Amino acid sequence: MDWFGTGDYDIAREVLQRGIAAIFLVAFASALAQFPALLGDNGLLPVRDFVARVPFGRSPSLFHWRYSDRLCRLVAWSGIVLAAAVVLGLPQLGPAWLVMIVFLLLFAGYLSIVNVGQTFYGFGWESLLVEAGFVVAFLGSADVATPLPVLYFLRWLVFRLEFGAGMIKLRGGREWRDLTALFYHHETQPMPNPVSWFVHHLPRWFHRGEVLANHTVQIIAPFLLFAPQPVASVAAGVIVLSQLWLVLTGNFAWLNWITIVLAAAAVDDAAFRWVGGLFVPALRAPGSAAAAGEQPAWFVVVVLAVTLGLLVLSYWPARNLLLRRQLMNASFNPFHLVNAYGAFGTVTKERFEVVVEGSDSADPRDPTAWRAYEFRGKPGDVTRVPGQFAPYHLRLDWLMWFLALGSRESRWFEVFLARLLQGDRATLRMLAHNPFAAAPPRYVRARVFLYRFSTPAERRAEHVWWVRSEVGTLVPPVRLPTDTEDRSAS
């Protein structure tokens, strides 16, 4: 059975299982904290309305059976507990079927959340986590040798992720082809972090080098994942280093971290020990790889059947990679298995921000009464240093970035403004600062500003990270209707 199982990737299996579980833990914790406010019974886009118009077959979810905020929290807490157990290595001590069941429960629970999450869960890394969680379920436990078909499918997943992102850039905006994309990206990315300001001000030759390095990693390295060792391990290491640079310079939820974890599928135990030996010399000693030996017949049948099914589903994303009009972050089935990936086919050259303000004055024309709400991650107060939040995902803040770009999916924003006027506690808990802690404002409005990073001279003189100028009004002052107006309307 040497063709099926190997003892040379036991460390990779541990990294893959525990790493994906750790990201599941973050994702379920995010759902626990944000889902009810965004999509719950009193949310901005209630799940009940969604499941009433979208059938189960198009978007399979436990919440088609029934939805309540309590059930949502139960699913999230269950996911947190199961994911934590895998991070601690508990299910891996048992038979292979136990690990399989735990990961399939994580897969089903998070799929149920994603499939009713609408625009708040419409990100590529949501589908990536769902797909990865399903595939690693079939890596087995210490009872069996690590199955090679699953390892190679995980490499195919990394290939789609990296090569898809590389091709979407080459086929996208001219700025990727003339190597100028990163003149702008560190400033205009959805959520800069504390390092972004400093990297933005590096010389332009450095930014051109960043783009060239990105193309090299995303276009060439994915093919080398399928090469013999140690070439495959080196290719995976190059991808990991590129992802760590993205971790250092931005906030992309768990996209970079899950890519790092998945790249372990191409790293054998010898390479892991060599890297570990750089820090702990004792780790350089060769390990005793478990012999492949006999695999349980049921395990072989299940793994091969699942791999065959995934390969059949691979037709659509493989075809998409060859299309001139390549789809980005697309799912071809309602279970989010074997998806197309990609990011930032174009880079925006200017940064627009929607600033939401409230006023408790009876006269909305009084300019002194308006005070701004501050979001946790997106830029607002120009004196506040950008924060570090990834791998945690601030969904409201990301949607505000898309709103500033002119997103058509803005119905949620109208409800958001209404919740601010109502003083809704769940909505306000998603913000960093509520300037109306004593009572809700009478009016709210939304203005659009052009933001840019301050220059080093402006930073020293004015102690600001951003410089902004107003460009227009998105929503003029609005208020809740009075009882008299309600009766007149009826």
Image (cartoon, helix red, strand yellow):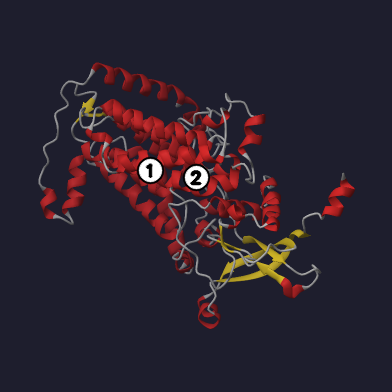
**In this view, 22 is above or below 250:** above
Gap between marks 2 and 1, in whole Å?
Answer: 36 Å
Element class at badge 2: helix
Mark 2 or 1, closer to the camera: 2
Q: Tell me the amino acid under the disc marked 2.
A: Ala
Looking at the picture, tell me which residue is in the foreground, 415 or 345.
415
Q: Quadrant of the C terminus?
A: top right
* The quadrant where residue 259 appears: top left
Residue at 71% over, 53% down: 418
- Tell me the crowding category of disc 2: few under 14, some 14 to 19, or many 20 or more residues within 10 angstroms, Cα based: many
Q: Which residue is mark 2?
A: 31
**In this view, 348 is above or below 289:** below
Looking at the picture, tell me which residue is in the foreground, 187 or 238.
187
Instruction: Tell me the number on the disc at residue 36.
Output: none
**Mark 2 or 1 closer to N-term?**
2
Q: Which residue is mark 1?
A: 220
In the picture, measured across the screen, residue 101 lies left or right of residue 392, that is left
- Residue 255, given in percent of the width and then of the height, sits at 44, 47
Residue at 58% over, 26% down: 58
- Residue 211, given in percent of the width and then of the height, sits at 45, 55
- Residue 333, given in percent of the width and then of the height, sits at 52, 27
* The quadrant where residue 422 appears: bottom right
**In this view, 325 is above or below 381:** above
Which residue reaches farthest right? 488
- Residue 334, given in percent of the width and then of the height, sits at 53, 28
In the picture, measured across the screen, residue 478 lies left or right of residue 349, that is right
Can residue 129 be spotted in the picture? yes
Residue at 22% over, 19% down: 296
Can residue 167 be spotted in the picture? no
Q: Tell me the amino acid under the disc marked 1.
A: Ile
Element class at badge 1: loop
